[in-house]
Amino acid sequence: MTAWCREALEALDRADPLARFRAAFQLREGLVYLDGNSLGALPRRTLARLEQTVAEEWGEGLITSWLGAEWMTAPRRVGDKIARLLGAEPGEVIVADSTSINVFKALTAALSLRPERSVILSEAGNFPTDLYMMQGIAAFSGGRVRAEAVPGEAVLDRLYEDVAVLLLTQVHYKTGRSRDMAEVTRRAHAAGALVVWDLSHSAGAIPVDLNGAVADFAVGCGYKFLNGGPGAPAYIFAARRHHAAVVPVLSGWFGHAEPFAFEDGYRAAEGIERFLCGTPPVLGLTALECGVDLMAEADMAEVRAKSLQLGCVFMDLMDAHCGGFGFTLVSPRDDARRGSHVSYAHPLGYGIMQALKERGVIGDFRDPDVLRFGLTPLTLRHVDMLEAVLTIREVCETRAWDDPRWAVRAAVT
């Protein structure tokens, strides 16, 4: 445990190569925002870009902006930019729909490539939408497909010859545990299964190398570390080697080879565009592109190094200042096994988090007892870790969590 003091943390901030990015985001003075892993902060450039899209491209250009303002090609253009953050090639990532819909697309694509196999496999405790999509596909199949979720430590041992596709989150949404993508993919391929990776807590947070890992499919959201805004469109990766063999189950008109031919029969587009469905959400794509462009300006090695350092500082300070208040670390201390958030379990976690939010330290709570603290290197300072931990201590010392307003949990935690 390192006895971090304010002066030492401020020195780290002065030497921080990413410090310049903080001014690029709209953050109110005094706020310690530890929830960028759930909703990224607003890039200042997004406001002007959205105003231009609404007032000029929509307001003046109207329907001509589909070509004149390049709305039509935005899903591929932004997808190619995201691909550079994921170790993918141009033409392997497209922006479309929500993460949930893209999980469905990826799973059904993988199933179509393994028709002799029947099991979709994941780990128990994976993010619920991933498990729900598995269950929905299994129910719709009428028994042809089975969805199985086993304990995380046993998932690779369950790769029997009936498994068609393995669905895993690279960085676990609750604990922050990070999986070795290359090794897991290698094990799955050796067993004859394909892999779908959920990168919602990876993209923009840790280095990702999909093609280096020989990944098959991947999905992720745009509103966390990519700072695309609430409800930002998601993305899907499909390795180029799979494009020609997959005919998407969700065969929408924008995935057609010639959408404006208006044919009655579906012909899939040749490349990644076949994973499109309906009309692109232009305003959401515009905001997302701003966040992705900003993320692309940062060096991912520096992002990862600062993320890990922020995590170590936070955990050291929690040990020093909050060790007697009943917190249990549920995230790995090992840097190689931790993503970009740190989580603690506490039986009074919900009330503690609400009291923290009232005091300007914003994290989030995940049932049944987990407090998550997201570490977003472009916006956070090292000294913010001290401010957050001292506030946690104050909440516990004053029993500020014991408030009747928090006896019933809100709809969003």
Image: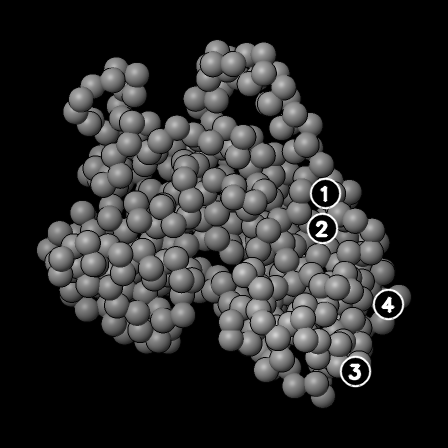
Mark 3 vs 4, N-terminal side: 4
Measuring from the top left, give residue 191's x and y in whole percent.
Answer: 21, 63
Measuring from the top left, give residue 360's x and y in whole percent.
Answer: 76, 61
Mark 2 vs 3, N-terminal side: 2
- Kind of residue indicated by mark 3: Glu
Q: For mark 4, what is the residue?
A: 6
Image quarter of residue 183: bottom left
What whole-number distance in Å separates the C-alpha atoms at marks 2 and 3? Answer: 29 Å
Looking at the image, residue 225 sits to the left or right of residue 100; the answer is right
- Kind of residue indicated by mark 2: Thr
Q: Residues within 10 Å of mark 4 (few under 14, many from 20)?
A: some
Q: Are marks 1 and 4 in contact (CB under 8 Å)?
A: no
Q: Nearer the viewer, residue 320 or 308?
A: 320
**Residue 315 in sight from this viewpoint:** no
Q: Which mark is residue 25?
A: 1
Quarter of the rendering occupied by the C terminus: bottom right
User: Of tags 4 and 2, which is closer to the observer?
Assistant: 2
Whether residue 184 is situated above or below residue 63 in the rendered picture: below
Q: Are marks 1 and 2 in contact (CB under 8 Å)?
A: yes
Which type of secondary structure does the marked residue at label 1 adopt? strand
Which type of secondary structure does the marked residue at label 4 adopt? helix
Residue at 26%, 56% in the rendered image: 136
What whole-number distance in Å separates the C-alpha atoms at marks 1 and 2? Answer: 7 Å
